[in-house]
Image (cartoon, coloured by chain):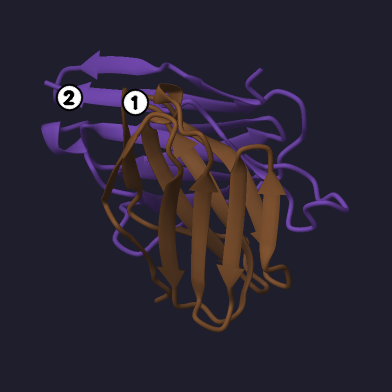
Chain colours: A purple, B brown
Amino acid sequence: GAVVSQHPSRVICKSGTSVKIECRSLDFQATTMFWYRQFPKQSLMLMATSNEGSKATYEQGVEKDKFLINHASLTLSTLTVTSAHPEDSSFYICSARAPATSGVPSGELFFGEGSRLTVL
Amino acid sequence: GEDVEQSLFLSVREGDSSVINCTYTDSSSTYLYWYKQEPGAGLQLLTYIFSNMDMKQDQRLTVLLNKKDKHLSLRIADTQTGDSAIYFCAEIGAGSYQLTFGKGTKLSVIP
């Protein structure tokens, strides 16, 4: 079963409204979560790194006031797309880093199922 | 920045083997990954290989790593229609926690 749950899986909203997407790690505590954006037929673009209890680290070119990230607990990170516009329509994917193990010292990354945002 | 390159499309007949190739530029790569993405879904980790290995086999999947040439491949034996998906190659560098992804290879399996 899924170890990272993302909600909602699909959302349609009107231009100018804000949308919140949740990312939850179900089986482990994740001090670090990542948010990606995927454009059609393209790879994932890392938007930001979400650290529990501190401010998110945004990649160059990503507007922090536009994409608000909150990592309030060890199992939940949220991405809020504020004042959404049609160009924000995309597939957003989160991932959470599991604790390091002997098999995967870097800590395995688990991905959510993704959230498709359509802004009308 | 570091780069990961993959061919965009691959088409194979059901039952044949598929080989998806990937090249990367980061000489400090520690782990290399293969992810599978089915339509409208998130990424599923298929397998990974540590940079000091040159081969890893896991059931129908075989990963080959040529560290000198910075070339990674994923071989799927006895390809099935359920293997149709986009396959992403990704790497993580030493001291880093961020993955760099390729653009993905769309595998189409012909019945």
Measuring 76% from the left and 35% from the top, which residue is drawn there? Answer: A29
> What residue did someone put label 1 on?
B39
> In the rendered view of the protein, which quadrant contains the N terminus of chain B?
bottom left
Q: Residues within 10 Å of mark 2 (few under 14, many from 20)?
A: some
> What residue did someone put label 2 on?
A119
Q: Tag 2, which secondary structure?
A: strand
Instruction: Give the residue at the far front of this rendering.
Output: B15
Frontmost of labels 1 and 2 is 1
Q: Position of residue A63 (x, y in %)?
A: 31, 52
Q: Tag 1, which secondary structure?
A: loop
Q: Quadrant of residue B27?
A: bottom right
Measuring 71% from the left and 40% from the top, which residue is drawn there? Answer: A30
| B77, B48: nearer the viewer | B77
Residue A116 vertical position relative to residue A47 in the rendered view, above or below:
above
Tell whether A111 sits left or right of B48. left
Measuring 22% from the left and 39% from the top, which residue is drawn there? Answer: A40
Residue B19 vertical position relative to residue A40 in the rendered view, above or below:
below
Please state which amino acid type lies under the numbered disc 2. Val
> In the rendered view of the protein, which quadrant contains the C terminus of chain B?
top left
Q: Residues within 10 Å of mark 1 (few under 14, many from 20)?
A: few
